[in-house]
Image (cartoon, rainbow, N blue to C red):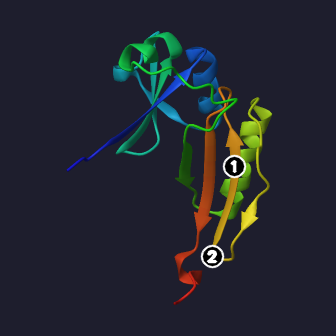
Amino acid sequence: MATKVFINLPVKDIERSRSFFEGLGFQFNPQFSDENAACMIISDAIYAQLLQETYFATFTKKPISDAKKTTEVLIALDAASREEVDQMVASAKKLGGRIYADPADHGWMYQHSFEDLDGHQWEIAYADMSQFPTQ
């Protein structure tokens, strides 16, 4: 059974991407970071491995999708509050990201979304499970 998750994402400029995510408050594990990779810590068991496109290409025989033109994945992260959702999306926009959807309030869950500098889509959500609809 897996105990950790590593999300591998191709990026055009490691340092630019790293600065973007540091601006959002993420830290990086230097043990797994170099000129080709930046290991972003999402939690103690979840990491986003930002890989320079040329290095990413060494792990696959398929063409690398252009996330600015096609959706390759939606990465969803939880937040501690609605305010944290809004703050992270606002920070992403300020750092050069793009908001690609309006916020959605489902009563028990609130979410908002942004694209990072390479077009990867991030969904940030706060869920109040005490308000989850009963069946």
Taking the spot 54% from the left edge, 45% from the top edge, the residue there is 75
- For marks 1 and 2, the one nearer the N-term is 2
Quadrant of residue 39 in the image?
top left
Q: What is the CA distance from the residue labelled 1 to the residue labelled 2?
A: 17 Å
Image height check: is 131 above or below 100?
below
On the image, the x and y values in percent for residue 57 come to 44, 15
From the viewer's perspective, tell me whether residue 117 is left or right of residue 130: right
Looking at the image, which is closer to me, 66 or 21? 66
How many C-alpha atoms fall within 10 Å of the one at disc 1: few (<14), some, or many (≥20)?
many
Image height check: is 108 above or below 126?
below
Looking at the image, which is closer to me, 58 or 36? 58
On the image, the x and y values in percent for residue 99 come to 77, 43
Q: Which residue is mark 2?
A: 108
Give, as a three-letter code, the residue at label 2: Trp
Give, as a three-letter code, the residue at label 1: Ser
How many C-alpha atoms fall within 10 Å of the one at disc 2: few (<14), some, or many (≥20)?
few
- Determine which of the numbered discs, if any, sits on residue 63 in the image: none
From the viewer's perspective, tell me whether residue 13 is left or right of residue 6: right
